[in-house]
Amino acid sequence: MDALELLQQRVSAGRLVAPAPTAEQREVLFQAAMRAPDHKLLRPWRFLTVEGERLRALGELFAEAAQHQGGEVDPAVLEKARNNPLRAPLVVVAIACLRAHPKVPPSEQLLAAGCAAHSLLLAAYAQGIGGMWRSGELSFSPHVAKGLGLAVNEQIIGFIYLGTPEKPARPAAPVELAPFVSPW
């Protein structure tokens, strides 16, 4: 697959099963992430990998976070939170690490971290690894951030679910460009 085909054909894979990416494949994923556009080479990101029994621990952390939102929580919501990380054999927590810099504002650092996560997803697709970037309320939960050991200058930008696609990838639907591109 050439680079342009990869960029134009990548799709998310919602149903992921074992095996998780190998150590060699993970090396490629994280090396690709390190090539994201990055003003002043701050590398304002880091990643946590979660697999095996730690997926259940992450699910418990998610359930606790749901309970911290206040009020009575439907047991079905708690069960869903507990099971969310079990949808893939590997979950990569993408984290933006923002710091004061005279030439690189936090917004630019956040974008760079997003680019690193996207590069990781592209590298997964290029290797035949299924991937899905998920976010939602739990990405913004102070309880989840604390449970994962994030510093005050860090924020979760997404949970990247990785594994073997349960079924072949659906073809990427063509996109009409006119609504998104225009001359000035």
Image: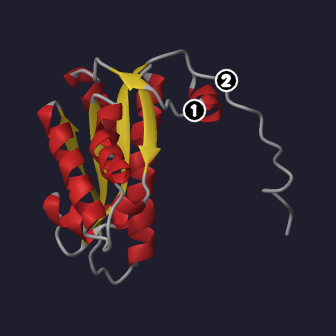
Residue at the spot 67% in from the left edge and 23% down from the top edge:
171
Between residues 37 and 148, which one lies in front from this camera angle?
Answer: 148
**Kind of residue indicated by mark 2:** Pro
**Between discs 2 and 1, the one toward the N terminus:** 1
**SS for tag 2?**
loop
Tell me how far mark 2 sits from mark 1, CA to CA.
8 Å
| Image coordinates for residue 94, horizontal then vertical, percent | 32, 52
| Residue 43 visible somewhere in the drawing | no
Callout 1: few (<14), some (14-19), or many (20+) C-alpha neighbours within 10 Å?
some
Q: Which residue is mark 2?
A: 171
Residue 40 position by quadrant: bottom left
| Image coordinates for residue 101, horizontal then vertical, percent | 30, 80
Residue 55 lies, with reference to residue 98, above or below; the image says: above
Q: Which residue is mark 1?
A: 11
| Image coordinates for residue 118, horizontal then vertical, percent | 45, 45
**SS for tag 1?**
loop
| Image coordinates for residue 84, horizontal then vertical, percent | 34, 42
Give the left or right position of residue 180, taking residue 58 as reference. right
- Looking at the rendered image, the quarter that the C terminus falls into is bottom right
| Residue 109 visible somewhere in the drawing | yes
**Tag 2 near tag 1, CB within 8 Å:** yes
**Residue at the limit of the structure toward the bottom, as seen here:** 102
